[in-house]
Image: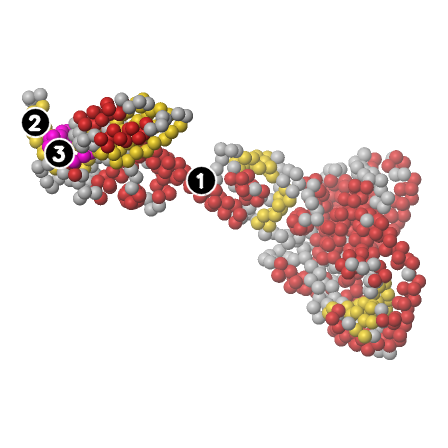
Amino acid sequence: MFENYFTDNEKILVLGQCKTLIKLTTGILSQADITNIHRIIKNGIAQNRYHRDKYGINPTIRNLNTAILLAENIKADRNMIIAVLLYNLCKSEFITETELKNLFGDDTCKLISGLIKISSLYKKQAAVESENFHKLLLTFAEDIRVILIMIVDRLGVMKMINHHPNEKFVHDISSEAKYLYAPLAHKLGLYKIKSELEDMSLKYTDRATYTQIAHKLNETKVERDKYIDDFIRPLKAALEKTNLNFEIKGRTKSISSIWNKMKKQHADVDDIFDLFAIRIIIDTPLNKEKSDCWLAYSIVTDMYTANTSRLKDWISNPKSNGYESLHITVSGPSQKWVEVQIRTKRMDEIAERGLAAHWKYKGLKSEGDLDVWMNNIRDMLEASNTPTELMRDMKMDVYDKEVFVFTPKGDLFRLPAGATLLDFAFAIHSNIGSTCIGGKVNGKNKKITYKLNSGDTIEILTSSAQTPKPDWINFVVTSKARNKIRQAINEITSKNAGLGKELLQRRFKNRKIDIDDATLTKTIKKLGYKTATDFYVDLKEKLDINDVIETYLNVGEHDNSANIPESAENFILQQHEDNATQSRDMLIIGNNVDGMNYKLSRCCNPIIGDDVVGFISNDGAIKIHRADCGNLRHLIQKYPYRRIDAAWSGRLGGQFAVTLKIIGNDDIGIVTNITSLINKEKDTSLRSISIDSNDGIFRGFLVIGVNNTDSLNELIKKIKTIKGVKDVQRSNN
């Protein structure tokens, strides 16, 4: 069974890994644990459930590698080791959750569940270098030990892929190590792992630069080692004269660190002044740590001149990830700058291994609380011989106030907790939000009110017929969505108001009614509207425009009741017989009765000779309309009891305004001929003229003053005789 699964070299490697792991986990894994793990993996391989990945990496070797590195670097607990070794078989559902719990307990199940959830993120194809992905990773992990496993696993993979034939795979793994796992290792205080990840990432992504720096360091190794020895020898002698229990050593900085300094300082390797660092590690009780470190500091600075501007005191003020140390830069032999790090054995243990000292408990409300939390956790971890036991209860809900969701293409979005599908649509684009009708969340149809969960993959569905609704404001939580909804609603309102206004203007024009702004404002107020916008919106959707026009005309009549036209100053109300059987009131328009509130209607401009009808307005005034007036027809249909018969007395003086519509050929001088004819007519005057010419045809409206219909009809006949005039008509409603 194993013959086909492992190559000969892999068999030798696996046997060595197993021996190493058993030795490292003595006292951690029981014999029963080892037996059960071996049985499960053996059966999984036999049943073809323990596959190499698509890049040819053997999962058994990878997992054993990770388990060894965890035992060496993290002091991993039993459940972390088991979770690493059995994760793949659980993911393929070879082991049931019940079987796993019975054999290894709930805690192991929780760790494996976290690893499986994190692995699902990579299927989203999100950009791992984004800060949002980092946060989502922490949210999904739930347990800090899952993050530690992921970091160490990536270190193991990086060690396995040197000269792997798939260059893109190597580049992608290296990029993840640089942008995701190395920063996480740094935050956790795993500086050794962080440096290894960064060095290998540089090696795989820019092998030429890595090789150049490595060769340069190798060339100068003998010289550098001699300088370090010359620097340490007198310093060690001075420290030995004190009662300090210490060790002192020198180390060359990592290649990636040197490369970063070269880029930052725009310098070559030879010009970097602090290629190596001297470390003094003091074994001292906790209550004497600070005083002993500062004692060592005084000895170093007495012997070598310090650059005080480069002093870094992380003992008085530890880093947020728990790092404590004194860093001094001094001028050593030959005036070369040397960095000296002073720390205690406890501090060095934290710096080398890390204790997950920066993650926060549930309930922290801001990033500002993080330092306080980290200091508290660091104290607890330092007081425990088994820090991973404390880690078990550290829930990784670092970002429980946010949710992280994906588009189908893998783009990652961060939104506040409680955000809805509609919030997400507006986060993508305002137009998508405005036309959103729902969406598919993880392949299932959901409404726009669906509340998002971290890890959701969302496809937004839109419709061109959809527009933002006022009630959307009630369930979105992001300010962007609220603002865009309000903006869109305002735009729709403005558009509808514009359409309503155009409708009103068109109907007024059709009825030959001039719009007076002051009268219209009073009309809007009388109809109960506080703003013209609300009025115009309802005019398009709710109001009867004929009622609006009637109200407008009534308001206008009331405002102008004192300005009675010169051509109809009085009227006579007389009785007359109708068919010799009954009598009714008739309004006789003349010039011998005063005190009546009436007016000739502006919509049809009646003149003497027209058949006229009176209509009683809401305010009691009587308006005189031509009998064929369209407005009058609408009004009488609704209010027939307000109709009053009317007739002219024939005794009025002055002129009436009449509008003529003329159509003719756009010949030179035709307009001049028309105006000259009107001006020559007795008792006729031209008040205004409006001409529009298009494609050789002119159309015009003339407002003229006439005494009665006889003089009007005579004028129309004469205008029709002018060459080029095709038609002349009195403009009707």
What kind of element bears circle 3? loop
In what quadrant of the picture does the N terminus appear? Answer: top right
Q: Which disc number belongs to residue 576?
A: 2
What kind of element bears circle 2? strand
Residue at 82 percent across and 45 percent down: it is 62
**688 vs 591, nearest the viewer:** 688
Q: Amino acid at mark 3?
A: Leu
Crowd band around label 3 with a 10 angstrom C-alpha radius: few (<14), some (14–19), many (20+): some
Which residue carries the number 1 mark?
492
Q: Position of residue 106 (x, y in %)?
A: 70, 48
Instruction: Specify whether 51 is left or right of 122.
Output: right
Residue 439 visible from this viewpoint: yes
Q: Check contact, mark 2 vs mark 3: CB within 8 A.
A: no
Range of the magenta residues? Answer: 643-657
Mark 2 vs 3, N-terminal side: 2
Q: Is residue 70 above or below residue 171?
A: below
Instruction: Specify whether 658 is left or right of 480.
Output: left
Mark 2 vs 1, N-terminal side: 1
Q: Is residue 18 above or below residue 43?
A: below
Q: Amino acid at mark 1?
A: Ile
Q: Position of residue 252 (x, y in %)?
A: 85, 61
- Which of discs 1 and 3 lies nearer the camera? The answer is 3
Residue at 70 percent across and 47 percent down: it is 128
In what quadrant of the picture does the C terminus appear? Answer: top left
Q: Quadrant of residue 636?
A: top left
Q: Which disc number belongs to residue 287?
A: none
Q: Amino acid at mark 2?
A: His
Q: Position of residue 690 (x, y in %)?
A: 32, 33
Q: CA distance from mark 2 to mark 1?
A: 57 Å
Mark 1 vs 3, N-terminal side: 1
Q: Which disc number belongs to residue 652?
A: 3
